[in-house]
Image: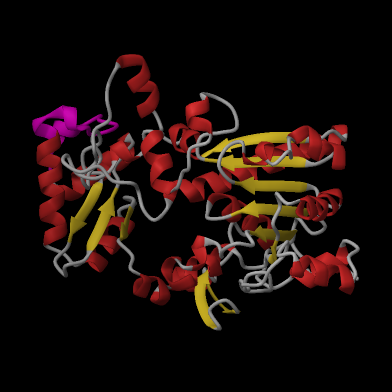
Amino acid sequence: MSLPVPKFGNLQGLKVLCAGGALAGPHGAVMFAENGAEVIHIEDTRSKDVSRAVGDGYLYAMDHRNVLEMSLAIPTPEGKKVLERLVKRSDVLLECNKGGTFEKWGLTDEVLWGMNSKLVIVHVSGFGQTGDPAYVNKGSYDSIGQAFGGYAVHNGTVNTPMAAKPVTCDHMTGLSAAMATMFALYRVQQTGVGESVDVTQYETVLRAQQFQAALGFTEGVEAERYEGMDVRIAGDAFYKCKDGKYVTIFVAGQIVTARCVKLLGLGSDYDGMTLIQKRDGELADRFVNALRKFTAEHTSDEIDDICTKNAIPCTKLMTYKDMLENPHYAAREDIIEYYSPNLKKTIKAPATFPKFKKNPQQIWRGAVDHGEDNEIILKEIGYDDKEIKALYASACVTKL
């Protein structure tokens, strides 16, 4: 028999194991599943993944669609035997735990390569597999990664820092893990030799800080909190409109700046400016005040229409209701419906992305319950009914 994964997408035939809970690792793994890979998620036998409870189960519904679900006590002797059989038939093992967890279980990279020399091993953690021992084994979630990686210090108010929501760090880390996996797979294809990748939450958001981190490390310039407006670029903010809704307008580049200045009737003082920055003092204040007055005198739809006609980047601040009614969302089929067994109902959710012309992605299955696919997976790797019954009896596999 074979596992029930339909053939579609650019990754059909790729076999991925994902071991560990919320959220960065599973988010990376679901990117593979949405592109046609066979993805088996190994969930802890002792308790359900915490993401099953977040957002009334909708988080699990999003990041486990198209995924086969198995529960397995990996650290046990029998659990390691099951894992070995899974590893032998897999291309990728993506594990998401505290740093050093697999090594502590005796499952070092070298041991795993002994099972499958071509295996791409992707370790996703908060602080990494190496480094200061005091950090490697620390637990981490989204806000921890943002705080240690220097991302959260940019967000919030002067008095209260905050993590960028929703779960920015976890999702960026998951995407980074997926990208790194493809880098490694490309090299394995050339050499036939496996690779190990160490992906951390904090390094992901450290790298995502544009110029700020380099400026801070080199010049000693500490981060300023945004408080709703860019700390350097005048006008990069959200503006309340006549109808009580918000728009954002971004003005950069000499041509766009000139268009916006003309629209606002600000005169020749801004001629030749490529970017109006807060350090420009009175000119920046006058520009921001003119934008505020302009938006306050029009509805959000009017502002969007005026700016679009004048080729000035602008959009309304979209609510979920706005998205459901928006013609561009509809034309690109950005919101889809499918049945999610874990919620026991049909849901509307974001579609797959990005969009491929020749080998499109698809959602063939919603997220399922804990251990739902234990039997078909175990039979696929050679276990018979008697052996499967013994695994359940020993709690090596479970259904909670």
Direction from residue 160 to residue 328 in the image, left or right: right
> Residue at the spot x=61%, y=43% of the render?
177
Spot occupied by residue 225 in the image (x, y as percentages of width and height): 24, 38
Direction from residue 99 to residue 117 in the image, left or right: right
Q: Is residue 267 magenta?
A: yes
Q: Assign the C terminus to one quadrant of the image.
A: bottom right
Spot occupied by residue 180 in the image (x, y as percentages of width and height): 65, 39
Q: Nearer the viewer, residue 333 or 351?
A: 351
Q: Is residue 168 magenta?
A: no
Q: Nearer the viewer, residue 38 or 315?
A: 38
Query: Can residue 193 be seen at all in this image of the molecule?
Result: yes
| Total marks placed | 0
Residues in magenta? 266-283
Rendered image quadrant of residue 2: bottom right
Residue 66 to residue 25: above or below: below
Spot occupied by residue 343 in the image (x, y as percentages of width and height): 53, 79
Residue 172 to residue 296: above or below: above
**Residue farthest to the bottom, as pictured:** 345
**Residue farthest to the front, as pictured:** 394
Rendered image quadrant of residue 157: top left
Query: Can residue 3 be seen at all in this image of the molecule?
Result: no
> Residue at the spot x=75%, y=35% of the render?
109
Please name the colour scheme applied to the rendered image: secondary structure
Q: Nearer the viewer, residue 172 or 256?
A: 172
Residue 75 to residue 241: above or below: above
Spot occupied by residue 398 in the image (x, y as percentages of width and height): 68, 68
Q: Assign the N terminus to one quadrant of the image.
A: bottom right
Direction from residue 357 to residue 351 in the image, left or right: left
